[in-house]
Image: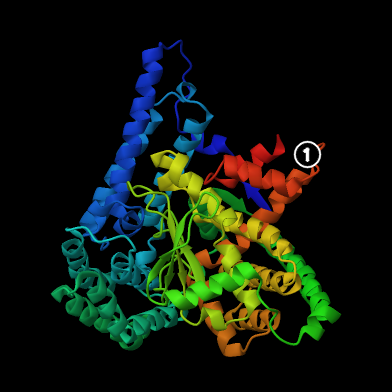
Amino acid sequence: MIILSTVLSALAVISLTLSCSKKEDFQGSLMALDSLVEESISLHSHLHPLRSSRLGITGSDSRLFTFSRQEIDRSLEKIDAILKKISTLPANHFDNDRLDESTMLIRWLQGEAYALKELQIFRTNPLIYTWMLEEALYLIPSRHTPPSEQEFEDYSKRLSRIPGLISNAGLLLDNPAKIVIGPAAFSTRSMLDDTGNIRKLIEDRYDSVPSSFDVAMESIETFHNFLIHDLPEFSHGRFILGTEVLSDIYRYSGQIDIEMEKSSAEAEKSISKYRSQINSIDRSPKLRDAGHPLTPGPGIRAMLDSIEISLDSKKVFGPIGKTPFSLIRRTPPPLHEILPVNPYLVVPYRKVVDIYSQGPALLSDEPCTRSIIVARGAERTSTAQLTYGLYGVSSAVWEAERRLCSDSTPAMRLLSGELFFTAWKIHNLKELSSMASEMKMKIRKIHLENKIHDLTMMIIVFRLHSGSFTVDSATDFVASTLNIPVDEAKYKVSIAAALPSAALPGIATIMADEMVKQASTVRGERYPRKRVRRKMLENYGKPFSLIMDEIKY
């Protein structure tokens, strides 16, 4: 099971001095907290310029954190200074929402310090560098808003910092485990093979390519050769983090405490249940007699026609409900839908999908709209797969992020985590998959298969890093559970060994189920799933500990 951290543990560092303060004292405390949020956003721009660019902080577009000693020391000094200032703020001067912000801010700062001082995955995991290289190359020229006058120059400056990042990687990587090198080399090879497409992406946006691009790609080729030829000779380290370190990672990144073996046992039971449901669907005469993909309904057919017509151009379909969107027809770049609040604590894990939604830049002045990216060839997948993908970017799923964009504070926009939005999507996909009339069984099967995959990845992350699975036993477990070839299973095991973030979708799946169970215990509650949706919307982006308390009462 997953035990949720209490707010009190994080608030212990806030002064609880009770006094008869005047109104101006309360106002002064609010202004002081707002000022600390601004300092934190500035720190985030220095420490995480790649995520800051996603959030719309264009002043970060020319930056790239390279893990130099000077950058790390400066960041740690700033973290310590902000934490000291927060500790002087009287908690009784804030309402619950501002206290929640303070809690999240404290935990984020503590996590950043832990990542830089103790965890230091920039010394043990080359995937932190390959993720940064992908984000630095693809993100800015993939934007869908027109470029500013400064953007080309800023992008060129960011690319010019890639050789420094790679140089530091060669100096810092110290005895990583061999199993994590393969996925990193696969990533660098993919970037090198995609050089022509990246160049075209840049040319299409700016009509020219900066000279720093060729230098950056040469550096990436050097890094690739280092990964496949030089680094393996000095890579005899263990990939196992241990349960204590893994627990710290999830505690800081998602504000949850996890009993890993109990969670794994629960996940195995769920996988068995979902597999039985899939077998029942497969035995259904309706599904067996269909014999071919079901005809899409009028709405899906219109979307398919629009995808086919739009090809490389942008077509505005909105508004759908309250959320207008742009449909963009192209091969999605290797970018993640949502980044963790601290990518140096949990390196992002990306699932390849044909359809995904790219949300707004939350800390910019842009309107709260989004883009839906549809890969070329997506219409050739089964109608059920395409429908399920479209449900995943529907207005119902988008609603929480829309509220975060339009109604929340800067602190919440900065600190809202990947785990919340993953659980939110899973919860809503369950509802939407039940609404698909003709294709209900096929879509339900896809939903169950996805949950089995996510729970399987969570189990092998937990058991590999606790030492209860060897690489071979984990490979056998994945191959048999997912019914996939051994080579494919081996690759998934290497991802689980390298990326604790690969467990997050499975954790979110368990959390989504636990919230419904909790809502079912509320006296007089006839519609627990609706209660969960309502409480998640009222507390969008917050840690599960706070949401679970809201569900209870």
Task: Answer with the quarter of the image where residue 309 lies.
Answer: bottom left
User: What percent of the width, then of the height, locates residue 290?
Assistant: 77, 83
Q: Where is 473 relative to 162, above or below? A: below
Q: Which residue is mark 1?
A: 522
Q: Where is 268 relative to 419, above or below? A: below
Image point (37%, 70%), residue name: 131
Q: Where is 289 relative to 318, above or below? A: below
Would residue 116 be found to the left or right of residue 511 on screen? left
Q: Quadrant of the C terminus?
A: top right
Would residue 299 be found to the left or right of residue 84 on screen? right
Q: Quadrant of the N terminus?
A: bottom right
Q: Secondary structure at mark 1?
A: loop
Image point (44%, 57%), residue name: 370
Would residue 49 be found to the left or right of residue 508 on screen? left
Would residue 313 be found to the left or right of residue 297 on screen? left
Type of amino acid under label 1 = Val
Viewer-nearest residue: 285 or 274: 285
Q: Where is 68 relative to 271, above or below? A: above
Task: Answer with the quarter of the image where residue 268 lies.
Answer: bottom right
Image point (79%, 40%), residue name: 525
User: What percent of the width, then of the height, locates residue 310?
Assistant: 43, 74
